[in-house]
Amino acid sequence: KPRLGGRVCSFYFTVLIALANFSSPMLVPLLCCRMMKMTFKFGSCEDTISGLAFMSHALLHYSDDVMLASRVGRIAEQLIVGNIHEHSLRARLTQMTGSVKVMVEPFQAAVEHCRKGYNSAKIVGDVDNAVLCGMIYCMAHFFIIPDLIGLQKYMVNFFQQMAKHKRIGVLRSAMSYFCAVTSLIGNKKSCKIDSRIKMKTNEELYHIAEQTQSAYLKHHVLTNQMYIHCFFREYLIVANLGEDYRKMHTGTNVGTKRTLDFIKVFVEGICTLFVCLISLFVTTFISDISPFVP
């Protein structure tokens, strides 16, 4: 068993990693590495499981070793099962292990994974992680393209819980997915306004992200806008949004990577290719007809 000093330090490192994941993601790999070194020195404890989960998240984002990240994440998941604090650990770590799971398993598996995390968070009364698990559930459900109308209704009910507990930051990020779902249903310009919650459009959310300097909110807004504009074949807009996304990663955000970046890269790549092909076609067409134009 670990000595008391090691256990206390592991606890503080767990708190630091959780905070750094939102405020300064580049610190997460360094903190995880330090935490693992402490585990080798003082022994394993409950917070070691948290360190493994965050380590898998860091390996995915900063070493691009998906398979190693998946193996470490599975070790963390197996250690959670049967632990005396199983529900508390699952509630806190679902977001980390889920980010790796979507890379190696179908999105349907991520949906079930998030549902389990949400239920565990409700059991132990962990409101913050219940909200995060619910948001990831909405995100995963959105990308498997289910019954969009049913998902929209679920989101409205979920928003009421976030508003009740005053989790405004997560609520705003989740609203961007609601706007995307509404756009796919058919209303491209605005989202359905619910009388109990002040719903906002993607344009309003982007403005809020600019004012509050929230890279987390801007990440979700831009990703959803690129996804929707690509769906409607507005390729040049997607290319311009990609430029805005890259400008966001300056200062303290340099090098920051997030789970949904692969969707952004895929969508932007397709749209940029189409823009280049269209430009090439127009240039060739003009050069071909120019001899015949007086």
Image (cartoon, rainbow, N blue to C red):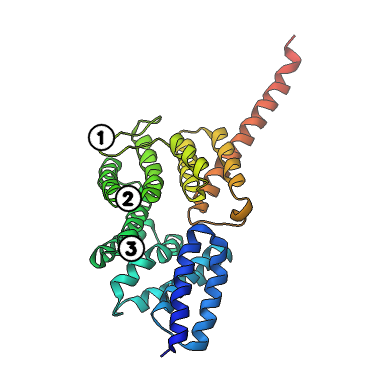
Choose mark 3 or mark 2, whichever is in front. 2
Q: Alpha-carbon distance for marks 3 and 2? A: 25 Å
Q: What amino acid does circle 1 point to?
A: Ser
Q: How many marks?
A: 3
Using the image, tell me which numbered label, if any, was put on residue 45: none
Q: Which residue is mark 2?
A: 166
Q: What amino acid does circle 2 point to?
A: Lys
Residue 72 appears in view = no
Q: Residue at x 65, y 26 (%)?
A: 282
Asked if the residue under mark 1 is in contact with the one under mark 2, i.e. CB atoms within 8 Å, the reply is no
Q: Position of residue 8 (x, y in %)?
A: 44, 80
Residue 278 as seen in the image, left or right of residue 291: left
Residue 187 appears in view = yes
Q: Alpha-carbon distance for marks 1 and 3? A: 32 Å
Asked if the residue under mark 3 is in contact with the one under mark 1, i.e. CB atoms within 8 Å, the reply is no
Q: Residues within 10 Å of mark 1 (few under 14, many from 20)?
A: few
Q: Which residue is mark 3?
A: 113
Q: Is residue 144 above or below residue 184?
A: below
Q: Which residue is mark 1?
A: 195
Q: Residue at x 38, y 56 (%)?
A: 107
Q: Residues within 10 Å of mark 3 (few under 14, many from 20)?
A: many
Q: Position of residue 105 (x, y in %)?
A: 41, 62
Q: Is residue 155 above or below residue 123?
A: above
Q: Work out whether residue 197 or residue 147 is closer to the camera in this orientation and state it.
A: 197
Q: Position of residue 288 (x, y in %)?
A: 71, 22
First in sequence: mark 2 vs mark 1 = 2
